[in-house]
Amino acid sequence: RAVDLNAVVADAVDRLRLTAEDRGITLRVGGRVDAVVHGDADQLMTAVRNLVDNAVRYSPEGTTVGIGLSSADGLAQVTVTDQGIGISPEEQERVFERFYRVDSARSRQTGGTGLGLSIVKHVVINHGGEVSLWSQPGRGSTFTIRLPEWEDDGAAVDGPPAASHVTERRGH
Ligand code: ATP
Ligand code: MG
C-alpha cells in the first residue's frame, strides 16, 4: 500500500502536540516533500511517534524538537532532532534493544518500558529501511529513518479506469 509520509509525520506530531506543550517543548516540522513509501501507515506513524515521544521526554524545558522530511536517491528520510540529554557512545547500540533504558535519573523519572525504540527498529526493518542514531551527551540526539520510496512503475498504481465521454443530442 502506498503511504504518504507527510501525512504520517503530521499525524504523529499532532498526537504529541499537547504533551510537548505541557513540557515546554516546541515541535517544529520542516521540509515537506512528496515522499510516498510502501507499507503500513499505522505502523509507520507509531514509529515516528515513538521517536518524537522520546525527543520530548528526554529534553529539558524550553528546547525545540525538529522533525524533518526529505528525499534523495530513492530513499525517503525522516529525522527527529532534539536538544536533550543525549546518549553516550556505549549506550547508542543498546537503546534499540527491548526493555533497555539508559540508567540515568532522567530516564528513571519518566518511567517508560524501554520498548519504544525496539518497535521503531522492527517497523523500519520490516519496511525495508534502516534507522540510525547520532548523539552527543549533553547536547542532543538525531534519529534518522530511511525508507525506500514507492516506485511508480505504472503497474503498481491501481487507478480508476480511463475516463470516457459521450454526448447525446437530439437528432436532426
Ligand atoms: P517507552 O517504551 O515508553 O518508549 P523508553 O522511552 O524508556 O520507554 P525507548 O524509547 O526504547 O524506551 O528508549 C530506550 C532508552 O533510550 C530510553 O529509556 C532513554 O534512556 C534512551 N533514549 C531514547 N531516546 C532518547 C533521546 N531522544 N534522548 C536521550 N535518550 C534517549
Ligand atoms: Mg520511548
Image: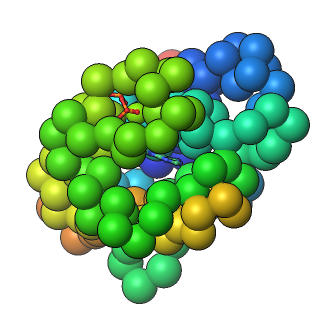
Residue at 18%, 48% (x, y): give it: 97
Query: Which residue is at the far bottom?
Result: 73
The answer to whether residue 153 is above or below residue 11 is below
Q: Is residue 169 left or right of residue 27?
A: left
Numbered circles on residues, count: 0
Q: Is residue 16 left or right of residue 65?
A: left
Quadrant where the N terminus sits is top left
- Corner quadrant of residue 55: top right
How far across and how far down the image is residue 131, in percent? 33, 62
How far across and how far down the image is residue 153, in percent? 23, 70
Query: Which residue is at the far right?
Result: 62
Residue at 40%, 55% (x, y): give it: 36
Q: Quadrant of ligand 2?
A: top left
**Does residue 166 appear in the picture of this structure?**
no
- Corner quadrant of residue 61: top right
**Does residue 65 appear in the picture of this structure?**
yes
The answer to whether residue 80 is above or below residue 14 is below
How far across and how far down the image is residue 39, in percent? 22, 45
Q: Nearer the viewer, residue 66 or 62?
A: 62
Q: Nearer the viewer, residue 118 or 153?
A: 118
- Corner quadrant of residue 46: top left
The answer to whether residue 55 is above or below residue 115 is below
Residue at 13%, 52% (x, y): give it: 126
Residue at 45%, 26% (x, y): give it: 108
Q: Nearer the viewer, residue 20 or 44?
A: 20
Q: Is residue 130 left or right of residue 142?
A: left
